[in-house]
Image (cartoon, rainbow, N blue to C red):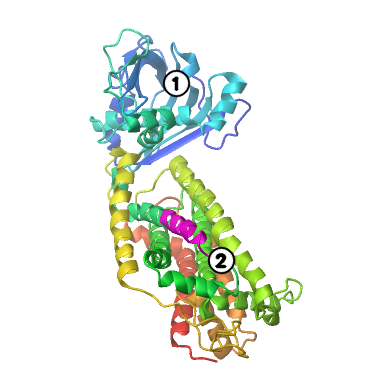
Amino acid sequence: MAEPPDATSEQTAGVVRLRLSLPVRLDLRRVPAAFGGPDAEWLGQRVSEDGVEPRRFSCDLELRVGRDQRVTFAKSAIVSFGTPQPTANSWVVPIEWRAATLTPLFPVFVGRLRLRADLIELDGLYAPPGGAIGLLLDRALLHFAARATGRWFVQKAIAAIANRMPAGEREWVMTSDANSAEPVPAESGRPGLLRRLEDQFGFIQLAREYLIPVETNSIWYLLGGVLAIGLALEIFTGFLLSTVYTPDAGLAYGNVDHLLHTFGWATVINFHYYNAYLIFALVLIHMVRVFISGGYRRGKEGLWLVGVGLAGLTFVISTTGEALHWDEVGFAVPWHVSEVFQAFGLASAFGYTFAALKEIPTATEKLAQIYAIHVSIVPILLGLFIGWHYLLIRFKGISVPFWLRASGRTADFTEHIRGWLIYGGIAMGIVLLISIFLPRDSGTAPQLLPSSPLFGATHGPGGLGYKPTFPISWTHGMNVFVDEKLGINPDIWGTIVGMVLLLGALVVIPFVDRGEREPDTSAQAFNWRKRGWAFLAMAVFWLVLIVGVVQNAIAEAG
């Protein structure tokens, strides 16, 4: 048997690293019986001679290719085991597999299976079938064949140790009575429209092929899907509003006022408004859950950073959305942007002076820029980051927090999606009811309009007592705090420093957390010796947010 690669081995030409892991609860005493004996009935028929290492087994595979369709490949793969090697807290089994008869279908893999009481991990290198062309196809298809084969083997290994098949297992099922390597499709009913769409696009199959721990079908994880649904509806209602909104500084306020007093459109714009609160709240809840459970450990720092990027984009889209309302509170957004530019001496260079903002033609230019950011640039980036986030979750695996006991059982991702729809339907239904029965007014017209009672004012919106709403209310609060408590002018440095502290605190968390893996108990989760700096960073984040929100609430005009 070829020597399996070490976890730190570098990839060479023509091969790709495959690393899969799944949180489980294993009885390590059963590992030698499952992997060390002369036979492995759970895997297939032994084809190597007694006493010869490695032990090779011929496997029958059944591959799901549609909603109710399967294809069986008899004795189509050869899986080889080396002798299980005990370590301090795990067993390591050398593994390799290759195709027996259908070489173009399966990758050649050499690696190790590491089994711990709480984790099973497959790590090694594989050569995609088809040489250089196969390597290109493998990259294009996101390593689909190799990962599917790896997940199949991990599931079988878990079942062998537990002496039962994990609930929800949807991968390839081994059989022992087939006598041919020819594919035999299962019978299926008459295909309908949904079946035809699935056959063409494979969305359901992609979801079913992705197995996750059953413990993740809980409210702690399903809120992430509710957040995704909320974002999708926010983009959809934003698209509807874009068909009737005019980003003109002289017309936008009247435009919004008309929508808020028009049946149908009032519900749409209110849903868009209230749903933004829910989205940001879900972002904060999700962030805290991942932090407490240490979900960014074991090589998942990038997953956390992408999440931080998503949180930042959510803040940006909330800020630009408030500006588009274009009352005096919305007018405060470009006003504060001007203050930021002035703090760095760039206001004139970018045409962002107070005088320019009080002129409707130049204010229209700025409003149009904010509009473009809100309806185009940020939604595109959100879509890319959301896709990136879910791909990383799929490739690196979902972590089970310590307060949910891992059973080793798995379910396909369609169960997770079903939970999304249930909880998402409840949450969105509540937002819809609020949008219908809790109307809003259009606020005070911005001071640049001659019809505004504030026309000709010598102070900005904050000086006149107009405060931003959550989640950007902390910015005004921090401005007041640095001015009144610290005596720093201009007070916009409160927003600038606050943003640096918030972003910096979140970015450094996975790098100052000295834990090696996700905590198994609350004692490990709150181990100040290993996680003290991480908790300090998170405390800085919440301190800035809370101080800003509270100071904004109690601040007076001026």
- Give the crowd class for mark 1: few <14, some 14-19, many >=20 residues within 10 Å: many
**Mark 2 — residue?**
246
Q: Give 152 or 509, whichever is nearer the viewer.
A: 152
Q: CA distance from mark 2 to mark 1?
A: 62 Å
Q: Earlier in the sequence, mark 2 or mark 1?
A: 1
Name the image quarter holding the C terminus: bottom right
- Position of residue 434 relative to residue 336, above or below, is above
Dot 2 amino acid type = Thr
In the displayed image of the protein, which residue is found farthest to the right? 349
Is disc 1 placed on a helix, strand or loop? Answer: strand
Give the residue at mark 1.
97
The residue at the point 32 percent across, 54 percent down is 424
Determine the residue positioned at 50% across, 31% down.
143
Q: Secondary structure at mark 2?
A: loop
- Amino acid type of the residue tagged 1 in the rendering: Trp
Point out the stretch of residues depicted in magenta.
232-245
Q: Residue drawn 57% across and 73% down?
A: 251
